C-alpha cells in the first residue's frame, strides 16, 4: 500500500541523463574532457559547419548495450536516430540528434530497498526506454559586457537518457531509485556519476491524484543534481500541487526549476509536447544495427553485476537479502566485506560490523570505504575475538575505536586496555559471592519471587569485574547460586 499525502497518491516518473564515459563525442572525434577553455573542444561537426556529417561513436553504443544488459532490457537489433528540432543559441544545427520512435534500449527494470514506515520493502520500477542522444552547448552570461557567449565544448557529448514508467509513489522511493540507478551506471563503468559536473542529471515528473483515479497532470522538475535537493524539490512540489487542487485550481503541465536557496519549485515554461519538436528520422545516420553476437560479446566481457553479486552473497554467505543489497552498494564495499568474511569465517558478524560501526564512522567523517583506516584483516581479527569469547561486544567497540584512531594490532590493544573477558570461573565466583554477601536484601527479594531484584545484583558484579565478566556466564552462575 503506498503512502498517501493529505489523502492524495503521489505519482513520479524519472528521466535521467547519464553522460557516457567515452573519450570522444558521440558523432565527432573531439574530446569530452571536463573543464577546458571554451570552444577548444568543438570541432567542425560540433559547430555544425556546412558539409559536415555525424559518425556514430561505437564506444557510446557499447555502453548503451551494457546498460541494457544490466537492467534486463531488450536491446533493439535496429534502432533509429531522429532529429529533435528546436531553436536555441547553444544548438547551432537547429536540432538535437536523439532517438525517438525506436530507442536502442527497451523495457527493463530497476529494483531496490526503501524504508516504508517502520519496514524495509523491496520496490521495482519499470523502465520504459533508454536512448542515445547528444548534449547541447552552453550559453555563458557572465564574461561579456552586455552580451552572451556560446561554449560548444559540451555540444555532442554522448548521453543515455533513461526513462521510467510512472511507478514511484513517494519522494523516498524516487531518491532510492535514483541512488540505485547511479550505483548501476557507475558499477558497470558507463558513467562517472559526478553529479556536480552534470554527468548524472535527473528530471522528476510529479503528479498527484486521489487513490484509484486517473493520472493527474504532471509538472517536470528539471536538472536535480543532488539526492538531497531531489527529495526537497519533490516534497515541495507535492505540497504545492495538493494546495493548488484543494484551492480549486487545475495543474498546468509545466517545466519547473528547483531553487535550493528558497527550497521552492517555480515554473520556467509551459511544457512542449513531442509534436512541437517535429521529430523525423535523421537522414545523415543509418539505422543503428546491433547483432546478437555483439550483445553476447559485451555480455561475456561484463563484470559481475550488483544484483547478481547480491544473490551470490545470499547463497554463499547465508546473508539476508537486505544485507546482501547493502553490501553491494559499491564494488569497494563488496570487496571489503568478502575479504573480512573470508578471513574470519563469520559472514553475518562481518556484515553487521560493516553496515553498523564501519559505515557509521565513515559517514561521520565523510569518507568512503577506500579510505577506511581499519583494514579487512584488522576487522576480521576483531570479529574473531568476539566469537571466541575473548571480548564482549562492548569491549569490541572500544578496540574498534582504537584501531580507527591509532591503528595497531587487535590482541595487543585488548591486552593494553585490559579488555579481556573474565572467563576464569573461580575469579568470577569470588566476585559473585562477595556481591551476594553485601546485598542480602536483593537475595531475599529474589528468592521471594521478585525477578527484578536480580538486576540489583548483576550491576555490582559487572562493576566489580570492571565490565570484563561475560554477562551470560554471570547469569548462569547467579542462577546456580540462588537455586
Ligand atoms: P516527455 O518525453 O514529453 O517528457 P514522456 O511520456 O516520455 O513525456 O514521459 C516522461 C516521464 O514522465 C516518464 O518518466 C513518465 O513515466 C513520466 N510521467 C508520465 N505521465 C506522468 C504523470 N501523470 N505523473 C507523473 N509522471 C508521469
Ligand atoms: Mg522525455
Image: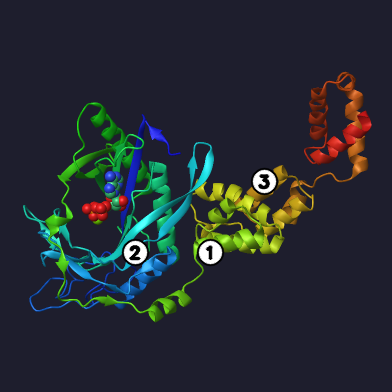
Camera sees residue 409: no
Q: Position of residue 12 (x, y in %)?
A: 33, 45
Q: Residue at x 90, y 22 (%)?
A: 447
Mark 2 Cα shell of 10 Å, populated few (<14), some (14-19), many (≥20): some
What residue is shown with label 1?
308
Q: Secondary structure at mark 2?
A: strand
Q: Residue at x 49, y 42 (%)?
A: 115
Q: Position of residue 58 (x, y in %)?
A: 31, 77
Q: Is ligand 1 closer than 8 angstroms to the Cβ of mark 3?
A: no
- Name the front one of labels 1 and 2: 2
- Name the front one of labels 2 and 3: 2
Q: Nearer the viewer, residue 301 or 247?
A: 247
What residue is shown with label 2?
106
Residue 444 vertical position relative to residue 316 in the rendered view, above or below: above
Quadrant of the image where one finds ligand 2: bottom left
Mark 1 Cα shell of 10 Å, populated few (<14), some (14-19), many (≥20): few
Q: CA distance from mark 2 to mark 3?
A: 49 Å
Residue 253 vertical position relative to residue 139 in the rendered view, above or below: above
What residue is shown with label 3?
397
Q: CA distance from mark 3 to mark 1?
A: 32 Å
Q: Residue furthest bottom?
A: 293
Amino acid at each position: 500500500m503506498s503512502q498517501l499525502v493529505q489523502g492524495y497518491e503521489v505519482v513520479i516518473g524519472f528521466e535521467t541523463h547519464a553522460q557516457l564515459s567515452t573519450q570522444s563525442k558521440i558523432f565527432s572525434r573531439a574530446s569530452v574532457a571536463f573543464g577546458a577553455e571554451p570552444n577548444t573542444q568543438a570541432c567542425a561537426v560540433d559547430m555544425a559547419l556546412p558539409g559536415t556529417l555525424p559518425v556514430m561513436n561505437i564506444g557510446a553504443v557499447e555502453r548503451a548495450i551494457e546498460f541494457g544488459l544490466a537492467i534486463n532490457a531488450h536491446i533493439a537489433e535496429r534502432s533509429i536516430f531522429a532529429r529533435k528540432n528546436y531553436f536555441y543559441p547553444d544548438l547551432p544545427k537547429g536540432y538535437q540528434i536523439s532517438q525517438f520512435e525506436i530507442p536502442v534500449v527497451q523495457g527493463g527494470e530497476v529494483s531496490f530497498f526503501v524504508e516504508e514506515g517502520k519496514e524495509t520493502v523491496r520496490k521495482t520500477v519499470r523502465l520504459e526506454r533508454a536512448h542515445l542522444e547528444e548534449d547541447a552547448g552552453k550559453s555563458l552570461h557572465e564574461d561579456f559586457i552586455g552580451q552572451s557567449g556560446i561554449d560548444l565544448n559540451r555540444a555532442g557529448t554522448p548521453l543515455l537518457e533513461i526513462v521510467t514508467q510512472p511507478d514511484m509513489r513517494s519522494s523516498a522511493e524516487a531518491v532510492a531509485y535514483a541512488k540505485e540507478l547511479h550505483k548501476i551506471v557507475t558499477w558497470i563503468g558507463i558513467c562517472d556519476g559526478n553529479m556536480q559536473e552534470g554527468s548524472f542529471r535527473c528530471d522528476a515528473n510529479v503528479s498527484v491524484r486521489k487513490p484509484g483515479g486517473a493520472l493527474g497532470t504532471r509538472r517536470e522538475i528539471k536538472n536535480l543534481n543532488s539526492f538531497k535537493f531531489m527529495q526537497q524539490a519533490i516534497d515541495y512540489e507535492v505540497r504545492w500541487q495538493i494546495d493548488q487542487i484543494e484551492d480549486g485550481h487545475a495543474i498546468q503541465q509545466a517545466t519547473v526549476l528547483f531553487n535550493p536557496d528558497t527550497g521552492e519549485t517555480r515554473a520556467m515554461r509551459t511544457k512542449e509536447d513531442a509534436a512541437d519538436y517535429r521529430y523525423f528520422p535523421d537522414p545523415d545516420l543509418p539505422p543503428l544495427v546491433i547483432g546478437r553476437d555483439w550483445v553476447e560479446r559485451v555480455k561475456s566481457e561484463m563484470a559481475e553485476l550488483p544484483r547478481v553479486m547480491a544473490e551470490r552473497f545470499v547463497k554463499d554467505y547465508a546473508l539476508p537479502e537486505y544485507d546482501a543489497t547493502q553490501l553491494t552498494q559499491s564494488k569497494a564495499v563488496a570487496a571489503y566485506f568478502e575479504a573480512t568474511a573470508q578471513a574470519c569465517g563469520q559472514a553475518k558478524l562481518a556484515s553487521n560490523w560493516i553496515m553498523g560501526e564501519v559505515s557509521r564512522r565513515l559517514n561521520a567523517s565523510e569518507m568512503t570505504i577506500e579510505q577506511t583506516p581499519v583494514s579487512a584483516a584488522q576487522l576480521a581479527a576483531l570479529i574473531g575475538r568476539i566469537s571466541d569469547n575473548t571480548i564482549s561486544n562492548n569491549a569490541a567497540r572500544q578496540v574498534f575505536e582504537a584501531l580507527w584512531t591509532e591503528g595497531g594490532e587487535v590482541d595487543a590493544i585488548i591486552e593494553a586496555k585490559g579488555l579481556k573477558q573474565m572467563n576464569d570461573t573461580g575469579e568470577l565466583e569470588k566476585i559473585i559471592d562477595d556481591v551476594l554477601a553485601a546485598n542480602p536484601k536483593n537475595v531475599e527479594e529474589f528468592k521471594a519471587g521478585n525477578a527484578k531484584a536480580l538486576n540489583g545484583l548483576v550491576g555490582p558484579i559487572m562493576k566489580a569485574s570492571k565490565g570484563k565478566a561475560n554477562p551470560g556466564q554471570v547469569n548462569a552462575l547467579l542462577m546456580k547460586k540462588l537455586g
